[in-house]
Amino acid sequence: MTQQFKRLKLDIVRPVPSDHEISRNQLPKHITVVGREAGITSEELEPYGAYKGKVKLDVLERLSDRIDGKYILVAGITPTPLGEGKSTTTVGLAQAIGATLGKKSFANVRQPSMGPTFGVKGGAAGGGYSQVIPMDEFNMHITGDIHAVGMANNLLAAALDTRMFHEATQSDASLFKRLCPIKKDGSRDVPIGLTYRIKKLGLDINKINEWSEEEISKFVRLDIDPKTITWKRVLDLNDRSLRGITINEAPTEKGLIRKTGFDITVASEVMAILALSTSLKDMRERFGKIVVASSKKGEPITCEDIGCAGALTAIMKDAIKPNLMQTLEGTPVFVHAGPFANISIGASSVLADKMALKLAGTEKGLSEEERRDKVGYVITEAGFDFTMGGERFLNIKCRTSGLKPDVIVIVATVRALKVHGGGSDVKPGMNLPIEYVSENIEMLEKGCCNLQKHIENAKSYGVDVIVAINKMSSDTNREHEIIKQKSIEAGAIDAIVSSHWEDGGEGAKELAEGVIKCANKEYEGQLDKEFKFLYSVDGTIEEKIETIAKEMYGAGSVKFSEIAKEKIEEYSKQGFDKLPICIAKTQYSFSHDAKLKGVPSNFEFPIKDIKASVGAGYLYALADQIMTIPGLATKCGFMNVEVGEDGEIEGLF
Amino acid sequence: MTQQFKRLKLDIVRPVPSDHEISRNQLPKHITVVGREAGITSEELEPYGAYKGKVKLDVLERLSDRIDGKYILVAGITPTPLGEGKSTTTVGLAQAIGATLGKKSFANVRQPSMGPTFGVKGGAAGGGYSQVIPMDEFNMHITGDIHAVGMANNLLAAALDTRMFHEATQSDASLFKRLCPIKKDGSRDVPIGLTYRIKKLGLDINKINEWSEEEISKFVRLDIDPKTITWKRVLDLNDRSLRGITINEAPTEKGLIRKTGFDITVASEVMAILALSTSLKDMRERFGKIVVASSKKGEPITCEDIGCAGALTAIMKDAIKPNLMQTLEGTPVFVHAGPFANISIGASSVLADKMALKLAGTEKGLSEEERRDKVGYVITEAGFDFTMGGERFLNIKCRTSGLKPDVIVIVATVRALKVHGGGSDVKPGMNLPIEYVSENIEMLEKGCCNLQKHIENAKSYGVDVIVAINKMSSDTNREHEIIKQKSIEAGAIDAIVSSHWEDGGEGAKELAEGVIKCANKEYEGQLDKEFKFLYSVDGTIEEKIETIAKEMYGAGSVKFSEIAKEKIEEYSKQGFDKLPICIAKTQYSFSHDAKLKGVPSNFEFPIKDIKASVGAGYLYALADQIMTIPGLATKCGFMNVEVGEDGEIEGLF
């Protein structure tokens, strides 16, 4: 059913126009064509307008016999605030493999938050001649998944607060009468959502009319300690005013005020669950496990206790289907889930990766040569640098999915390496200092230590590394040679210059050839090891954190705050200590201190707090205060936006 | 391009199963089939999954030469809290005209809020054998319009608060430098969103570098008086904890705390604008006119002043396209916009009505007979009873659209009329008192005064009225006869019993025949008048309110509170006094007092406050405190919801 792939021709213009202009000048294929070309049946594709579609999970079942395609992880070096082109490389590489080299390829990327879209950041669809189109649709709504995440998150929040209100204002008997009203025949109407708590408490639902007062009380009272509530409301906007708020101030709420705040929607645990779920059933179970608070006795109170997990699943039942879009050259893209990289895994969904790997996969029983010829490539991205994003990808996402990458691509730029070699700070909106726009071998050589540490870290998982040098116009050949040499020294299997931003897939052709060669183990000296995790989940929370901090970040020691110690004790008692760890820290250094460039070592790594995302399946340890809802600047993205009478958006980026 | 309509056969079961069960047992047609049958081209339809689609506004242009189809407004008598089946009648009538009688028909309904979906109310897709399917998709997300409304509303809120923050923490010079940064060539980069304020202030953008300090200050400082802010944030959930909140409490916000609250999304002015806009350009202009606060000098501060209207339009550019779905018998349904009936117009969109009227319309140059044969019917609904919802529909929505109904259908039930005849209170979840489940002629006869007043009110606009008696199982023929007789007495052109809830379109066949006859002026004694509004917008605010209260509600006088008087003065000064009026009051009485059943008269009608929805284009006058975000009950809709592994939702209603 796969039909011949039709490449969208690039009409390359110099100087490179704005991202939005490039996107608008390319007429995308209808999404049904993209789907057919990708091997998705028309029954499996649900178009959402002309250029977006949802793909049913049935694909996984239909292709379950296939051997997966090749799995390519794109990560980066420690970046500057300008970004080093990781998404652009992901898309460019997919264009090169799919459109230039004519192999099957999928780019798997995250859905961007609309907050930054109207803030300062601009879009996240790649850039230049390597992007996902139409970029305005990519950056707004897509098929509504983030909105569904927000609804699910906020239904749970409303249910939690309302339950506390009703418990505070009603007797046990009244609560029982209302929660499980007596029917005409004398039996009780027990909502299905409350049956899970009945089971958890070991009560017999068939003897509900014989429960003792104590049993009734245990059932109807969650007895939440307001101080322990960790569940916040969310909004997909940069709304700084909601960082800290007091709620329940209306007279109807009888003075039960409490302090809380909003996060940006992508920071919701619901989003992390969307990214990590392996099936609808798995998602349902994860929702049930979400811990929102503790009871006054210290027991974890879950979404299941509130009776809300089924409704969350209903809200999210379409969001679980990966979204199909396309690159500028018409190769397929899965856009699915976008957990906030600052406190979550920062990777797109397990289900989109699994689906793409099956679609890029091959039938069983092929010869090596046939498989080499037919196999496709799934390029997926990890947020931030390899050592943060890649580590989480491997130890959390891959642990959940059971997948392992065939190649890790580490994106490096001359600019960022010079920062690590002592160059002055760079900031968005500022002109670049002189060292970044002219050759500076010494500074670059010095800064390559950062790249080298990321390569070594990546190789420690047993996966080969290729360095992608994301070319910028002021780079010199000598500078590129140095990066190549330093990469090979550190154990990269190759280091290849790529000009996909200005040239599209054609500019990443050599990089694509290298990646294909590496994925098929055709370089000399490739690793011959099994993939392995950095740590076992069976260790203590402290051990796991220490392993990450020391072996990945280069810390000499870890200092746990008093709060962190208390949390460790609490989570261990509650049975949440066997989860993998997501460390939240700055992305601008291997360490916790954004100012420490290059490869800092022997620093004391602080853990200020630890929180639990039990539904998503990890603990996150905070090395710093992490801002979970950004603000808007004085001059803001939204001020540039206008819509013509033809419905065309102007000035989005 | 219209293809032969394929009726979905009903498989009628007794007793009538739950709404959700009926919906699930019917296999809908693919939305592309529904679109083709309705005369929508494949280029004009954007499918969103298999059973929903958006229809491009291009339809209006393509069919602009057609004479509109017949426009049927469905309204009700003063209802009980159980609802009297207005939506069900709307859908049943469309099924009867379209599927039973084989004419073109469209049901135009509102998109329901998800708040009540997970609260106690349940769905809003009609019911029994007259409903919109699939009902779970109808009740959740549809194509994301409500989410887009929320985003647009909340972007404006975030922009407003952030602007106040930046103004409070920066000098004029700093604000100016940031809002309009100096480019390399010395000119300033002025975001397009700020050019409107420059024009409004009469400043010359070409001389921006020559502006005086005073001019700069005027431009950069909106100088908002926090006490005057009327713009609230929204959420599409019943979250009572957010009714009253304090924001800006995070340390980053420098103590600029203020009190505010959330409304439910459908109460947002953005939703009212979606309902009332006549084109994308019109929507853009309305967004610009939204007034969010006053400056300390008392000038209205608009969305345009904040530079946000273009971005709101971008967020809403797909939401403006009406959504196509289908009834249980496969006739087309437009689901578009759902402004909160309590404080807004409670009707679906102008654009959906216009589109349906063109699709149901006929080519020019047909004979009377040919037109009679070919013309189609658009059944649209007004929230609440005729005297609230219908009055707003006619005086606000029709004033905007330029459309006028051919027939007004008033839905009555024996049950509700008995309440107006002195029957005891009815409440959801309670067993019905005896007078409602057995014949009670006296009570019914007495209660018919309520129906009669609605008929008289409706006729005063110059439109003929047909009464639809929504049949319930305990009704008797004698009871129906009395309603018929009383209806005719009051001037209704006919009164027809309809059993669409239990029989689908077939049950509304006679009603449909009556509506068709009336729309084509084939009854004897039909009105021969021009349609006329109740009031001219040129009157004063007081005059307009008094006209509605006295002529529609039966009030003897109107008492304006001090606040209301101040607002009238303020709005008159600001030039907002020539807008139509939306009165917010209880829907359970003609008066402001829910306890006054039947036809109260000579009461003093209180106006406690007046607010402005300048973008939507009306003032709303509050006869009472209106709750703008509902709460969740102890036992709540969400507790019944579960999702099977096959993705089927259980227990939604």
Image: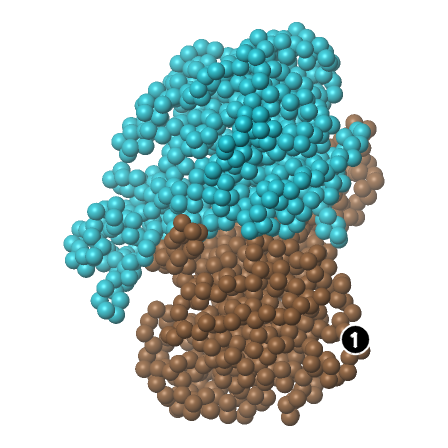
Chain colours: A brown, B cyan
Q: Is residue B150 above or below residue B417?
A: below
* Label 1 crowd bin: few (<14), some (14–19), many (20+), radius 10 Å: few
Q: Position of residue A382 (x, y in %)?
A: 57, 71
Decide: is B444 above or below B472.
above
Q: Left or right: where does residue A403 sit relative to residue A546?
A: right
* Residue picked out by circle 1: A364
Q: State whether residue A414 is above or below residue B597.
A: below
Q: Locate residue A25: give its quadrant.
A: bottom left
Q: Residue at x 49, y 84 (%)?
A: A497
The answer to whether residue A380 is visible is no
- Left or right, B393 with respect to B644, comes to left
Residue B28: where, in percent of width, then height?
A: 70, 43
- Looking at the picture, tell me which residue is in the foreground, B525 or A568: B525
Residue A396 pos. (x, y %): 64, 69
Q: Name, please, the residue furthest toward the top.
A: B442
The quadrant in which residue B73 appears is top right
Seen at 46% across and 75% down, the residue is A501
Q: Secondary structure at mark 1?
A: loop
Q: Is residue A504 visible?
A: yes
Q: Which residue is found at the position 39% from the left and 34% from the top?
A: B617
Quarter of the image for the C terminus of chain A: give it: bottom left
Which residue appears at 61% of the width and 55% of the height? Answer: A47
Between A203 and B256, the one lying in front of the other is: B256
Question: What chain does mark 1 sit on?
Answer: A
Residue at the outermost right position: A206
* Front residue (pair B526, A349): B526
Q: Amino acid at mark 1?
A: Lys
Q: Is residue B391 above or below residue B647?
A: above
- Image coordinates of residue A614 in percent, x first then y, are 65, 59
Residue A165 or A45: which is nearer the viewer?
A45
